Image (cartoon, grey):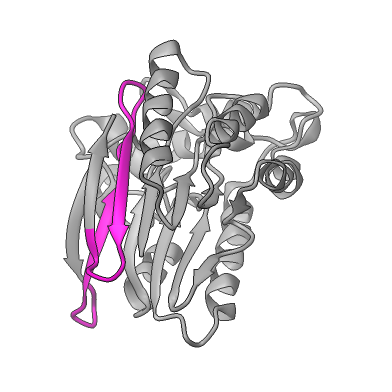
Amino acid sequence: MKLAFTSDLHSGASELNDSKIKELADYLNIDQPEAFNIIGDLGYWTNEHTESCLKKFKNLTCDKNFTAGNHCIYTWRCYDDSFEIYNKVLPQEAKDNNFNFLDFKPWIKDNVAIVGSINWYDLTWMDKEFIKYNPAAEVMYKRQEFFNGFHCDNQYVHKADRKRWNNKEFTDYVVARLEQQLRDLPSEVNYIVLATHHPAHRLMLPPKRADDDFMWTGYSGNERVENIAVTDKRIKLVVGGHTHWHVDTTITTPDSRPLQLINIGSSFRQKSLYVLDTETSSVERIIF
């Protein structure tokens, strides 16, 4: 069985960006997998961009899934609510365009499942040694700032009337949904692909070269999902996005199992597609 994964398509970002999405879609139309999966950030900024991305794959007849990304719940108007976009708008856009919204329902075929989530951050990934030598960072985290700017989530992810967003509460909410999906899988499922927009493991992040690279770590994930990734023996592959940085590495879990971690690594200038063969567990990366 072949499963295809991409992420961070950011439809509407530029003509070059959208031309790369078209190349990817054209390729899939010729060689269709069993299921095609977009792991977050389908659009650039608005829900209109998200839906325009879904429509680019209307000719695909295989199963189609996506998870939300942080850009998918961005708001522009003061009365918009990111939580409502996540819970109502995105599931409806998925239904309207013949996609399954993985955050709410896993994809299952035979013994294989794709379990997905936007995943989120609660600052449990903060680098404590970095904060020890840069005490201002702890205050900056509370304000969702960097040394050289601010996190766009602070401006565009919020509740109605610009009420402040609680990152820990949202992390708890999406992780609980993910845990429930894993518990509810049929007993015959023994091959899970864990697909999260914000990476599920710290080794899926870019290297740290500057202060803001350390700051990004705290904004990139959480310990609960990282623990799920390495302890659930059914999980054979972990796939993520968000950082626009390609990672393909294999770790040894605490119980001595090999576990492959892939950050898809799509950017605004090129798109990356990973094709998994579940029978051999081999993966192929194709760049557009």
Q: In the rendered view, tell whether residue 151 sits above or below residue 218.
A: above
**Residue 157: x and y, percent?**
63, 34
**Residue 61: x and y, percent?**
54, 48
Q: In the rendered view, tell whether residue 256 sits above or below residue 1.
A: below
Q: Is residue 227 visible?
A: yes
Q: Give the range drawn in magenta.
A: 253-282
Q: Is residue 272 left or right of residue 164?
A: left
Q: Indicate the quadrant where residue 14 lies.
A: top left
> Quarter holding the C terminus?
top left
Q: Which residue is drawn at 23% across and 44% down?
A: 285
**Residue 11: x and y, percent?**
51, 25
The residue closer to the viewer here, 79 or 263, is 263
Q: Is residue 240 left or right of residue 94?
A: left
Q: In the rendered view, tell whether residue 16 sits above or below residue 248.
A: above
The residue closer to the viewer here, 73 or 14, is 14
Q: Is residue 266 left or right of residue 287?
A: right
Q: Which residue is drawn at 21% across and 38% down?
A: 208
Q: Residue at x 61, y 65 (%)?
A: 177
Q: Is residue 135 visible?
A: no
Q: Is residue 254 magenta?
A: yes
Q: Is residue 169 magenta?
A: no
> Quarter holding the N terminus?
bottom left
Q: In this view, does 175 lie to the left or right of 94?
A: left
Report the residue that reaches farthest toward the top. Answer: 15
